[in-house]
Amino acid sequence: MSGLFDPWNDAAFIAGKLRSPANRLIVIIGAESWCEKCRNLKPHFEELARQAPAQDIMLWFDLEEHQEFLGQYIPESLPEMLIYRNTHLAARSLLPDGNRESLLAALQTTCLDQAGENDPGIARRLAREDWA
């Protein structure tokens, strides 16, 4: 099963996948209703999710739609990409222009320095099957 997963409907499946250290969680946080870069980026992210290898779990969190899940966490800028290995934040990247090329580049060369600082805990929460 590959594609763009939904944190509400696919909670048990995501939790099971996060148990394997070989799997990678890729999260984009955006705001489609008012962020033009986010609106431009989402179709590219969805396309990549459909083509993703089985070990990648790809989620899109909208600041408004998923506010209950994200809690008080608000990224410095939008859209923001977080990459987790198991439940540990391994990389963080801002996607300044919302195009496919910047997304691909961020997936290849993400800022690893201080990635774990200010971790919103998304992977830890998703790893609990009963969170939803």
Image (cartoon, rainbow, N blue to C red):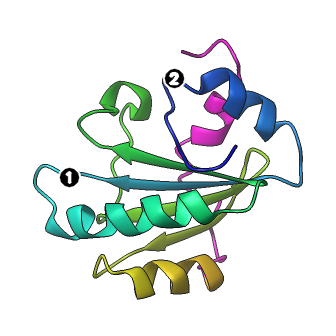
* Front-most of residues 119 and 56: 56
Relative to 66, 122 lies left or right: right
Q: Which residue appears at 79% of the width and 47% of the height?
A: 86
Q: What's drawn in magenta, residue-wise?
A: 110-132
> Contact, CB < 8 Å: mark 2 with mark 1?
no
Badge number at residue 9: 2
Residue farthest to the left, as pictured = 34
Instruction: Using the image as rendered, state which of residue 128 and residue 104 is in the foreground.
Output: 104
Q: Measured along the vertical axis of the image, is residue 19 above or below residue 68?
A: below
| Residue closest to the eye, 132 or 112 | 132
Q: Tag 2, which secondary structure?
A: loop
Q: How many marks?
A: 2
Name which quarter of the figure residue 100 lies in.
bottom left
Residue 124 in the figure: left or right of residue 72: right
Q: Is residue 28 magenta?
A: no
**How far across and down, in percent of the image, does residue 16 sit?**
79, 30
Residue 99: name its quadrant.
bottom left
Q: Secondary structure at mark 1?
A: loop
Residue 32 numbered mark, or none: 1
Report, in whole angstroms, how far the alpha carbon at label 2 lies from the one at label 1: 20 Å
Q: Give the residue type that dot 1 points to.
A: Glu
Asked if 92 appears above or below 74 in the picture, the reply is: below
The quarter of the image holding the N terminus is top right
Between tags 2 and 1, which lies in front? Answer: 2
